[in-house]
Image: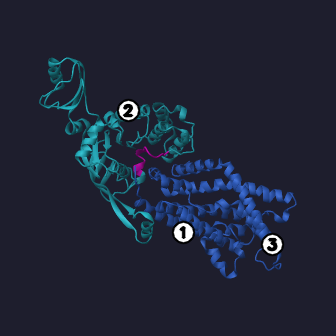
């Protein structure tokens, strides 16, 4: 029995619409038009305990809606959801006691309270045993380097500091499952690294099941072995990240600076991407010609000053994937 | 503390302590309420000057005491929904409200109660010090906030004030839930404020309305927020009358809680959260 089971999940929203301008506003008073937005059409996947799953997709694809249904906030129109054997929206109170959730764009800590008071309040709200609480809190404070922030009101924290405090707040009750909705949004590089490192350790060392959504592909690269790509409310791909890369954009790039003018290169499986004086950029398919053979062939015929191989950036892989599936936001 | 009530007690304490910190707001509110209280007292005095003694349903000194009580306890009336909740509705933080392993209605209810009582406490004490203690010492006895009719009246008044907190919080909950439905609490708050001014006794003690309205005025829910305890205080409602007043307050509390809970279940089942 998987820890998280999602089957044929569907959810629609009703959105009020009106024509632009004053006339449109007046018309809306008399007759309101509703438009139905299909946030989720048919989403199915399952997750074993201890897995770390990355959930990606363009804006409006249905990632957050899925997380909100999994965490018991929203009720789906149809389909089956179970987390640890519980149906989130039916047994909300029992369910939410066992999960931790962080929404990167919102705050769960009390704006005017010092961080430590917010933690203490959560201790009572989750009815955590005081001894367990003190131990968990001290661990989290040390791991997330919160010592110096504890007596500051939340509103005085920087975004990076606040996000670390938010993650600690979501883990005080030692949940089995952690949902992270864009946890690195807006963070600077060191904060992103700190968050990634922490999530990775939490998953590896504590076996906490993690489901995270993000637009930062480096989050995915650093964290998730398994990736689900969602678009238009449907699962477009569910595979290890490397497999996704192989399927979508397997080419690699070779950058060469020649001693003289860059020559014409005509080899099977190789394309010229750009040429500029003495520099040449080639795209090659490693399944047809391997990097060592290609480099050997070129350096045998020409005098080369510098040479290096690159993989297309992960953003490009994903953009290409969205493109192939027509998934980019309209 | 038993685990069942631990979250709610903690939420109450946290909100209460936080609200007590807003000292400038308390002083400003107190000053405004003194000013309005002074104007109202003078207007009543002008009215009563032209009334034949013994023909008014309550005396001038009772009306003056009623006025200072009303000014002191102004913020115990449900003038608006809880700003913390309407803020959470607008920012989407309401999602987090549903992520806590506790009953959302009870949680919001205790927060509303803490919000109102913590704001009322400093204002009421200041008003008592000025209108109840300083005025008599300054020889302004006729204009002052008088002690309750007798010890029993005071005990019943205290009980009735507890019911005020319970019934007002239940009403704030109705406003909170309507904020979740409409996403904007301003319209309903304006409407409620005018009903409160007219029907709670805030503008005019309900006893001074025409006789044919009296039964309706006592039974309608807004009397439970203010008029019933104040009538008990100065001895306008005694014996079975006082008991009936307390029963009405309890009745409206239960009705509002039952409606609020049923409504909340419906609203939360249809909750939509758009964007990010």
User: Does residue B145 lie above or below B214 as drawn?
Assistant: above
User: Can residue B12 be spotted in the picture?
Assistant: yes
Chain with colour blue in the figure: B
User: At x 16% / y 26%, what residue is drawn?
Assistant: A264
- Mark 1 surroundings within 10 Å by alpha-carbon count, few (fewer than 14), some (14 through 19), many (20 or more): some
- Mark 3 surroundings within 10 Å by alpha-carbon count, few (fewer than 14), some (14 through 19), many (20 or more): few
Range covered by the magenta-colored residues: A94-108
Chain containing mark 3:
B
Q: Are marks 2 and 3 in contact (CB under 8 Å)?
A: no
Q: Position of residue A117 (x, y in %)?
A: 56, 41
Q: Nearer the viewer, residue B98 or A308?
A: A308
User: At x 65% / y 47%, what residue is drawn?
Assistant: B21
Q: Along the horizontal axis of the image, is B109 left or right of A217?
A: right
Q: Nearer the viewer, mark 2 or mark 3?
A: 3
Task: Check disc 1 and report its element: helix, strand or loop.
Answer: helix
Name the residue tied to disc 3: B46
Q: CA distance from mark 2 to mark 3?
A: 77 Å
Q: Nearer the viewer, mark 3 or mark 1?
A: 3
Name the residue tied to disc 1: B255
Work out whether disc 1 and disc 2 sit on a shared chain. no
Name the residue tied to disc 2: A201
Q: Quadrant of residue B175?
A: bottom right
Q: Nearer the viewer, residue A95 or A154?
A: A154
């Amino acid at each position: 029995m998987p820890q998280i089971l999602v089957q044929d999940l569907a959810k629609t929203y009703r959105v009020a619409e009106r024509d632009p301008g004053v006339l449109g506003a007046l018309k809306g008073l008399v007759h309101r038009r509703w438009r139905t937005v299909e946030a989720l059409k048919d989403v199915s996947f399952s997750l074993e305990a201890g897995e770390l799953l990355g959930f990606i997709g363009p804006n409006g694809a249905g990632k957050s809606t899925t997380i909100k249904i999994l965490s018991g906030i929203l009720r789906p129109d149809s389909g089956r959801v179970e987390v640890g054997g519980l149906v989130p929206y039916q047994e909300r109170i029992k369910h939410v006691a066992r999960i931790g959730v962080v929404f990167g764009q919102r705050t769960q800590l009390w704006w005017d309270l010092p961080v430590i008071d917010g933690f203490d309040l959560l201790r009572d709200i989750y009815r955590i045993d005081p001894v367990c609480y003190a131990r968990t809190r001290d661990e989290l404070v040390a791991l997330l380097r919160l010592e110096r922030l504890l007596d500051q009101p939340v509103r005085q924290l920087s975004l990076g500091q606040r996000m670390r405090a938010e993650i600690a707040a979501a883990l005080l009750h030692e949940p089995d499952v952690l949902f992270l909705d864009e946890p690195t949004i807006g963070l600077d590089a060191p904060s992103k690294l700190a968050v990634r490192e922490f999530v990775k350790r939490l998953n590896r060392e504590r076996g906490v099941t993690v489901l995270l959504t993000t637009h930062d592909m480096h989050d995915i690269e650093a964290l998730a072995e398994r990736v689900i790509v969602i678009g238009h409310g449907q699962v477009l791909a569910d595979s290890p990240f490397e497999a996704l890369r192989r399927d979508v954009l397997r080419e690699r790039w070779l950058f060469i600076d020649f001693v003289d003018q860059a020559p014409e290169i005509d080899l099977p499986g190789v394309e010229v991407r750009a040429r500029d004086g003495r520099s040449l950029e080639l795209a090659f398919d490693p399944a047809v010609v391997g990097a060592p053979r290609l480099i050997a062939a070129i350096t045998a015929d020409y005098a080369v000053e510098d040479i290096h191989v690159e993989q297309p950036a992960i953003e490009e892989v994903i953009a290409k994937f969205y493109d192939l599936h027509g998934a980019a936001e309209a | 503390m038993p685990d069942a009530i631990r979250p709610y007690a903690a939420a109450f304490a946290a909100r209460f302590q936080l609200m007590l910190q807003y000292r400038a707001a308390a002083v400003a509110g107190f000053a405004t309420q003194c000013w309005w209280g002074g104007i109202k007292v003078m207007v009543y005095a002008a009215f009563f000057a032209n009334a034949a003694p013994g023909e008014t349903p309550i005396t001038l000194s009772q009306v003056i005491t009623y006025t200072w009580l009303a000014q002191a306890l102004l913020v115990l009336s449900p003038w608006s929904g809880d700003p913390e909740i309407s803020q959470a509705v607008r920012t989407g933080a309401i999602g987090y409200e549903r992520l806590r392993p506790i009953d959302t209605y009870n949680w919001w209810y205790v927060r509303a109660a803490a919000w109102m009582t913590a704001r009322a406490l400093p204002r009421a004490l200041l008003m008592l010090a000025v209108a109840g203690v300083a005025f008599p010492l300054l020889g302004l006895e006729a204009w002052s906030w008088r002690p309750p009719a007798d010890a029993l009246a005071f005990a019943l008044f205290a009980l009735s004030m507890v019911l005020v907190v319970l019934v007002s919080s239940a009403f704030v909950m109705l406003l909170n839930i309507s904020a979740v439905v409409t996403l904007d609490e301003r319209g309903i708050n304006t409407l409620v404020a005018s009903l409160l001014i007219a029907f709670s006794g805030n503008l005019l003690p309900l006893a001074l309305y025409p006789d044919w309205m009296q039964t309706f005025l006592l039974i309608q829910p807004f009397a439970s927020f203010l008029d019933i305890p104040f009538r008990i205080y100065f001895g306008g409602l005694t014996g079975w009358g006082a008991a009936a007043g307390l029963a009405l307050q309890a009745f409206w509390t239960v009705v509002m809680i039952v409606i609020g809970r049923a409504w909340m279940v419906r609203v939360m089942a249809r909750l939509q959260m758009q964007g990010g």
